[in-house]
Image (cartoon, helix red, strand yellow):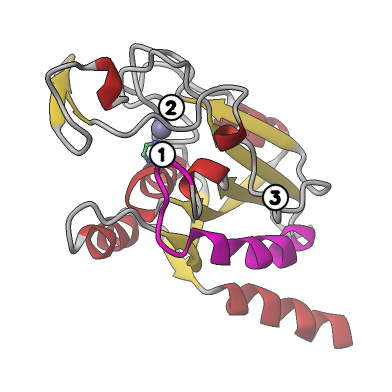
Amino acid sequence: MAKKKALIMVDLQNDFCQGGRLAVPGADEIMPLANRLQPLFDLVIATQDWHPKDHMSFASNHPRYAVGDVIVVNNIPQVLWPDHCVQNTKGAEFHPLLGLRHIDKIIHKGIDRHIDSYSAFYDNAHLRSTGLGEYLRSQGVEEVYLLGLATDYCVKYSSLDAIYLGFKVYVIHDACRGVELKPGDIAAAIKEIKESGAILVSSQDILGEDKKTAVL
Ligand code: VGL
Ligand code: ZN
């Protein structure tokens, strides 16, 4: 039997899209791709960044600091962000053009106010699992494909953790967009993703392949 494949759609939420609190350039362009890709997978996971209002990653909760500053909390560098993806707000909802009917499981992350969680699998200190790794294993998944936001944060850390957990990992590069806080951040993230052993693919590699099998 073919290896079971999961698609992990990372943080396709309003706050990371046009008009959102932490808008990632080009984010909205991903939705049509995500919608075409979903039916081709055995399992579809969507993550949501899901912060309490008093979350430590918000600059607004650190009076002497500004958005973009980096502080160190428990020996872990923390970028301070605008308030974003606050639980049960419009900004935390999925983008309105994202199809939801193929989604098998939603993973919330960043829910503990004391620590951030870029990865879909663990918090930034690697102390607590979100349950995603265990879920994928329980479903017999061996290969994971990642797309979403942001290339240089949540996609990167999710990909590194998926490798760490022993999955075969593919990152669908044209279905990701990055924050690029500093010029070169996206390129550096892509390099790190590749060096970790994840494989970069294009959405056409996947969609095209499906077309071939369809005519056979
Ligand atoms: C993200 C910054 C803060 C992401 C989440 O989804 O990449 N980035 N929170
Ligand atoms: Zn966040």
Residue type at the position of mark 3: Pro
Crowding at dot 3, Cα within 10 Å, few <14 / some 14-19 / many 20+, comes out as few
Q: What residue lies at 76% left-to-right and 43% top-to-bottom?
A: 103
Label 3 belongs to which residue? 96
Residue 101 is a magenta residue: no
Relative horizontal placement of residue 47, taking residue 76 as reference (left or right): right
- Under circle 2, the secondary element is loop
Q: Nearer the viewer, mark 3 or mark 2?
A: 3
Mark 2 in CB contact with mark 1 (< 8 angstroms):
yes
- Label number found at residue 161: 1
Question: 42 above or below 171?
Answer: above
Mark 1 in CB contact with mark 3 (< 8 angstroms):
no
Task: Give the distance between the C-alpha atoms of the residues marked 2 and 1, in whole angstroms.
Answer: 8 Å
The image quarter in which residue 22 lies: top left
Residue type at the position of mark 1: Asp
Q: What residue lies at 79% left-to-right and 60% top-to-bottom?
A: 39
Residue 28 is a magenta residue: yes
Task: Give the distance between the C-alpha atoms of the residues marked 1 and 3, in whole angstroms.
Answer: 29 Å
Q: Earlier in the sequence, mark 3 or mark 2?
A: 3
Magenta range: 20-40
Which of the pair 98/40 is nearer the observer? 98
Label 2 belongs to which residue? 122
